[in-house]
Amino acid sequence: MILNASELLRWYDTHRRSLPWRGSDKLRPSPYAVWLSEIMLQQTTVQAVIPYFERFFTDYPTVQALAAAPLEDVLQRWAGLGYYARARNLHACAQKVTERGGFPQTVDELQTLPGIGAYTARAVAAIAFGVPVVPVDGNVERVTSRLFAVEDPIPGARPQLHRHAATLNDDPIAKTRPSDFAQALFDLGSSICTPRNPTCLPCPWRTPCKAQAQGIAASLPKRAPKAVRPTRYGAHFIITDHQGQFLLRQRPAKGLLGGMDEFPGTEWRSSPWSEEEALNQAPALLSWTLCGEVTHIFSHFTLKVTVYGTRLLQNRNQTIDTDYGSFRPLKSAALPGIMSKCLALYKTSAQ
């Protein structure tokens, strides 16, 4: 099946989304803007990314500026966006790109950079450099599953979907505007071929769509049943000193929330912590207030954290072992979402 690229591009010229990382109608987006946005958009919605992108682009207007920034500053600006390995790879990639004098322009070369996989390499190559390849994100997977009426469930169907997606730009017209064609596919999935209740009537590819013809578009793509997400439990301790600073420590560079700041606490385990068990691991023998519990959902488990809080009198912070961290102002901290929730609960209970 060869799809009419002109119909999709004509629709895109009228209905394209206005996004801060896109170029104008006549100018191709900059490689830096495309790359930065694509890294941020992994596992994250467009609306959540926009303010982060704008902040990064203001503070680091070039890839060289990002490369020169301290990693701690980058992590602080990323705080709340999640999947923090992306921020570390972002910084490492910026340094590699700066060293080589700019972004490579081929899919294979782009994939040699930190944090750039097959999809991101194709997206940057197509959108920023006009390479005629089809980047396959969730939107393009959904469009493809409906165009070809692929009823096998994801993730098992992904190899088949990717083979079909590679043919979407077989029309020579698509190869004359590869940057716009890739973005048109994204917008089609975002605004018309949506996960629920697709609006098929105005779709530029309604006629050749096999799922629409069979009346099954809304049911695709099918997904295999998700495994039950396990629950883990932990306790964290929030301490302020007489200057209003907080006891913070940095998580290991590798692993979950790597390099981010946290309030000291217990390990996260599969069984709940009793109050006695938790307080035995507190930073000091102090009068602790039970603030309550917060819940945070990670991609592969749910975390329930019991929060304890206290305030220190003047100079009492000298009695706390440095293994638990050091007292710092919050404005210098890179707190992930779970720690921000703990902090909010502590502040509420202290009122």
Image (tube, grey):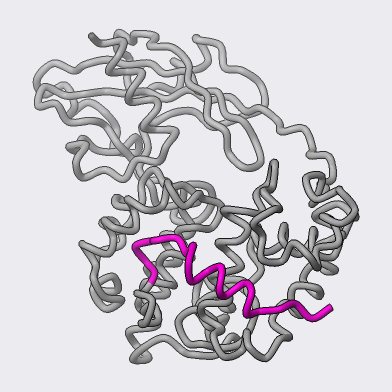
Q: Is residue 203 above or below residue 332?
A: below
- Percent position of residue 132, x then y: 61, 87
- Percent position of residue 105, x then y: 49, 90
Q: Is residue 289 above or below residue 115?
A: above
Instruction: Name which quarter of the figure residue 54 lies in.
Output: bottom left
State left or right for residue 38 relative to residue 285. Answer: right
Residue at 33%, 84% in the rendered image: 98
Q: Nearer the viewer, residue 243 or 137?
A: 137
Residue at 82%, 68% in the rendered image: 159
- Percent position of residue 206, x then y: 74, 62
State left or right for residue 90 relative to residue 155. Answer: left
Q: Nearer the viewer, residue 24 or 63?
A: 24
State left or right for residue 351 relative to residue 3. Answer: left
Q: Is residue 35 above or below residue 76?
A: below
Quadrant into which the N terminus falls: bottom right
Residue at 65%, 49% in the rendered image: 194
Part of the protein shown in magenta: 1-22
Residue at 35%, 78% in the rendered image: 95
Instruction: Name which quarter of the figure residue 142 lies in.
Output: bottom right
- Percent position of residue 149, x then y: 87, 59
